[in-house]
Image (cartoon, helix red, strand yellow):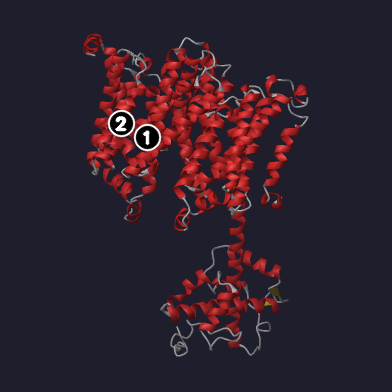
Amino acid sequence: MKTVCHHPGWLVSVVLIWIVWGTPSQASANDGPVATSQAMAILSYNTRIVLAGTALLGACCGAVGTHLFLRRRALLGDVVSHAALPGVCLAFLVQESLQPGSGKSLGGLMLGAGASALAGVACLEGIRRTRRLPDDAALAIVLSLFFGLGVVLLSIIQRLPTGSAAGLADFLFGKPAGLLLGDVLLIGGLSAIVLIVCGLLWKELLVVSFDAAFAVTQGWPVRALDLLVVLLVTAVTVIGMQCVGLLLVVALLIIPPAAARYWTDRVGTLILVSSGIGALSAASGVLLSAITPKLAAGAVIVVCAAAAFVLSLLFGFQRGAYHRWRQQRRAQRHAGRHDLLRASFELVERKLAESNATDDVTVPGWSLAQLETMRSWTPGRLPGLWRAAIRDGFVRADAAGLYHLTAEGARQARAAARQHRLWELYLIQYAGRHPVDVDPDADVAEHMLDPLIVRELESLLQPDHAANRVPASPHDAPARATPQAEATP
Amino acid sequence: MMSSVIQLVSEWGSYDTWIVITAALAAIACALPGNYLLLRRQSLLGDALSHAVLPGIVAGYLTWNAVEHSGWLPVSQAAGIRHLVLFGGAALSGLLCVLLAEWTQRWGRIDAGSALGVVFTTFFAVGLLLIRQAADQAHIDPSCVLYGNLELIVLDRIPGTPIPRAALINGLAVLINLSLWIVFYKELQLAAFDPGYAETIGIRASRLNYGSTMATAMTVVAAFETVGSILVIAMLIVPVATARLLTDRLPTMITVSVIVAAASAVLGMAALCCYRGRCSRPSVIPVSKMPGWRG
C-alpha cells in the first residue's frame, strides 16, 4: 500500500484504464433509474465517454488546485467560479441573438465564462493593488458583485420568451448526464491541454507554489506564473461548468489537494495524489449517480471527494490523525522509559554509595514505592511504565519481590542519566542556569538528545566527562566548582 | 427621467415603503458584524455560511413536512412554527459548518481558507443532494434560497399589524448586533486589532470569535429570506469595505458602514422602481460600491 501511494501515477492510470475499458458491474448513465439486474450490464459507450470526461476533469482540478492550496489561495477558485456566471449568461444572450436556439452551445458559453472569470480576477488584482483592503475582503467583494450581476442576467434570461433558457441553471449545479460526445471531446481536449501545461511547467510551478519568496530571489517570473495558475484555474472552472457546475467545481479544486496533503510531504507526489483523488471522486460520483436514481451527479462527486478527505484526515500516512496519534504515543513511551530508567539509575547510584556492591546489577533490590519517591510521576503512569520495562527486559524481580536492573537495563539507565546530566551541566555552564532550577529544563530537552548532540556535549564539557562515565548530579553537590577552566566557548 | 421620477413618487405606496425598510434593516444588520469580519480578515465567512445553510434549510423543511403530514400539530399555527424550524435548521447548519472548519483547521493542520473551503462546499453538496431526494415530497428550488424573495416576503405580515415578518426579524438582528457592539465594544476592538495582546491581558479572543461567528450566522440567516444568500455576502462586506476606504477609525467606520448600507438599500430600491418596480435586490450592491472609489 505504501509503495502504491508513493507512486500515485499508478492510481491514476489504473483508474483511467478501468474507466476506459469499463467494468461489467455498472449501469449506463443515460438509462436513468435502472433495476439492479440491468445495472450489471456492460457500461454503455456513452457512460464510458462521460466517465472519461469527468475523470479527466477531476484529475485536472486536483493538479491545478494543489498550486492554489500550497499558496494558501484556495478560495481564489471560489471567486473565479462565481465570477464566471455573468459571462455564461452574456454568452447565452449573444448566441441566442445571433442564431436563435443555439444559445446553449458549450463552446461559446465556455468562452464567455472564461472571459468574465478573468475580468473578475482583474478586478481582484485592481482592488488588491490599492493595498487598502485585506485580500479576503477583495475576494468577497468581487465574488458577490459578479455573482449578483450573474443572477440579474439569469433572471432576465428566464423571462425571455425563448424556451431554451430553461437549462441554464444546470451550469450552476452540474448535469454530466447531459453531456454530448462533442462536449466530452471539448472537455477532454481542454483537460489534456491543462494537464500538459502543468506537466511542462512542472518545475516552475513547483518552485513558486512551494516557496514564492525563494522563487523571487532566484529570478523566476513569479507574477507571470501566478497569472498562469489563475488561467489554469479559470480553464478548469470552465471545463467543469457542465459536469459538476460552477458552484461545485470549486470543491474539486479545494478538497483533493487538502486530502492529498495527509498522504505525503513531497510536492511532486502531492500533485499526483491530488489528481488521483480528484479523478477517483469524479468517476465514482458519476458512477454512483448513474446506478442510483435521484442523485445529482455534481453533488455526489463533491460528497465522494469529501469522503476521501475524511479518510485521508484520519488515516493518511504522513499527517493523518491516526498516524500522528501513533507517533505521539511512541514518543510518550520513549520519554516514559527514559524517565523510568533515569529514576532507577539514581536509586541504584544511591544504593551503590550506601552498600558495598560494586556494580549496578548487584546492588540491593528496591520496591516500586521507593522508585515512586525519585521523581513526580503522572498519577497511574508508573505501574504501566514498570510493566513495559519488565517486558522489555530492563528490569527483573527477585524472589523477595524486590527489583533489580538487568545488564542491558543498567547500560541503558546509565546512558539516560548521563544524557540528563550532561545536558544539565551544559545549561549551567553555557546558559547560565542555576544548579537548583536546571532540572525541569533538562527534563524537557533530554528526550530529544540524539547521539550526535551527546557527543558534542561530551567534547564541550571535556575532559571531565569524556569517558563513558556518568557525571555526578549537580544538585547533590551545589558547592562543587563547575569545570569552568576547561571551557573554551 | 424626470417624468419617471414623478411617476415613481405618485405610485409609491406603503408596500414599497415596507420593502425599503426591510431591505435597509437587512443591510444594516449585515453591516454591523461585517465590520468585525473585515478587521479579523474573515470576510469570506459570509460566503461559507451562505452555502453551508442549505442543508439545514432543506432538513428543516423536510422535518416540518413530516410533522405536518403526521398531524401532530394543528395546521392553524403552522406558518410561525414552520418559519422557526427553517430558521433554526439554517442557523444550526451554519454554526456546524464553522465549527467543523475550525476543527479541521486545528486538528487537520491545514490553512483556514482551505479548511473552510472543504467544509462549506461539502455542506452545499449535501444540501443539493437533500433537495433532490426531497423532490417528491415538495418542490424546493435552490435558486429561491440563493436569490431571496424581497417582493413576496413583504406580503407575509404579522397578524393584525402592517409590519412584515421579515422586517421584524431583521430589526431584531439589528438590535442584537448593535447591542453586542455596544456591550463588547472594547473587547471586540482589541480582539480585532491585536488578538495576541487581547489574550495576554485576559480577553478570550477565541471565545469572542465564536460569539461573533454565531451572531453573523444568525444575521445572515435572518437576511436570507429577504435578499437571498448570495447578496448577503455582498451586504456583509461591501458597505464595510466602503467605510474602511473612507476612514481609519473604528467608530466612524461602523457608523459610515451603517449609513452606506441603509443608503444603498434605499437608493437601490429607488433605482429599481425607476426601472421596473420588480426584482430589487441586485441593484442594492452596485450603488453601495460607488462611494468606495472615492476613498
Up/down of A449 relative to A51, above or below: below
Up/down of A136 relative to B72, above or below: below
Label 2: element kind = helix
Question: Residue B125 at x, y = what percent?
Answer: 55, 30
Q: Which residue is mark 2?
A: B289
Q: Chain of mark 1?
A: A
Residue at the image point whose x is 58% and y is 42% from the top: A197
Circle 1/circle 2 CB separation < 8 Å: yes
Q: Which residue is mark 1?
A: A141
Marks 1 and 2 belong to one chain: no
Q: Between A306 and A407, which is closer to the camera in this rendering?
A: A306
Q: Chain of mark 2?
A: B
Label 1: element kind = helix
Residue at the image point whose x is 31% and y is 28% from the top: B27
- Quarter of the picture holding the C terminus of chain A: bottom left
Graded by Cα atoms within 10 Å as few (under 14), some (14 to 19) or many (20 or more), the crowding at tag 2 reads many
